[in-house]
Image (cartoon, rainbow, N blue to C red):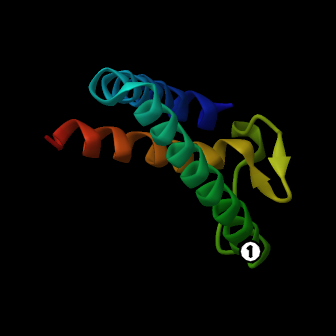
Amino acid sequence: MIYLYISLPFLVVAIVMASCSVVKEHKRGGAEAKRRQLWILGTVTVSVLILTIFFDNLMIWAGLVGYNDDKRMGWQLGQVPVEDLFYAIFVTLLVPALWKGHSK
């Protein structure tokens, strides 16, 4: 579970920053802008997660990457531990929040 404990604080920060960005967008552009931002965020997140699952399974299968079973939660998608997806979620939440925070 060590991978979870390492990833969780970063994921919480990304969720908070993304939430602040969505609220700011709602105040700036109204409900329609907020819906649009959430739709784009969801679409990008799902796309990145699908690609991450596919390519991480290939890398693990090829023996390029390995995970210590003692440090994992035990849940996996194919051969990919769920904790490995936290980085993809972190990036898809944080980058747009930072980008939107610096625009205008």
- Kindly indicate the quadrant of the structure image that contains residue 66: bottom right
Residue shown at the point (42%, 22%) measured from the top left: 16
Residue 91 coordinates in the image, percent (x, y): 45, 48
Viewer-nearest residue: 27 or 86: 27
Numbered circles on residues, count: 1
Query: Is residue 55 left or right of 97 when viewed as pictured?
Result: right
Looking at the figure, which quarter contains the C terminus?
Answer: top left
Tell me which residue sits at (83%, 40%) in the image: 75
Q: Nearer the viewer, residue 50 or 78?
A: 50
In front of the other: 4 or 20: 20
Instruction: Indicate the secondary structure of the residue bearing disc 1.
Output: helix
Q: Position of residue 94 (x, y in %)?
A: 39, 40
User: Could you tell me residue 41's position as x and y percent?
Assistant: 51, 44
In the displayed structure image, the side of residue 97 where residue 2 appears, left or right: right
Quadrant location of the N terminus? top right
Q: Which residue type carries mark 1?
A: Leu
Identify the residue under disc 1: 58
User: What residue appears at the point 64 percent right and 61 percent down from the top-left corner?
Assistant: 52
Q: Furthest residue to the left?
A: 104
Which residue appears at 17% of the width and 43% of the height? Answer: 103
Mark 1 residue crowding within 10 angstroms, few (<14) / some (14–19) / many (20+): some
Q: Is residue 59 above or below residue 45?
A: below
In the image, 13 versus 34, the foreground residue is: 34
Query: Is 42 on the left-hand or right-hand side of 102?
Result: right
The residue sitting at the bottom extreme is 62
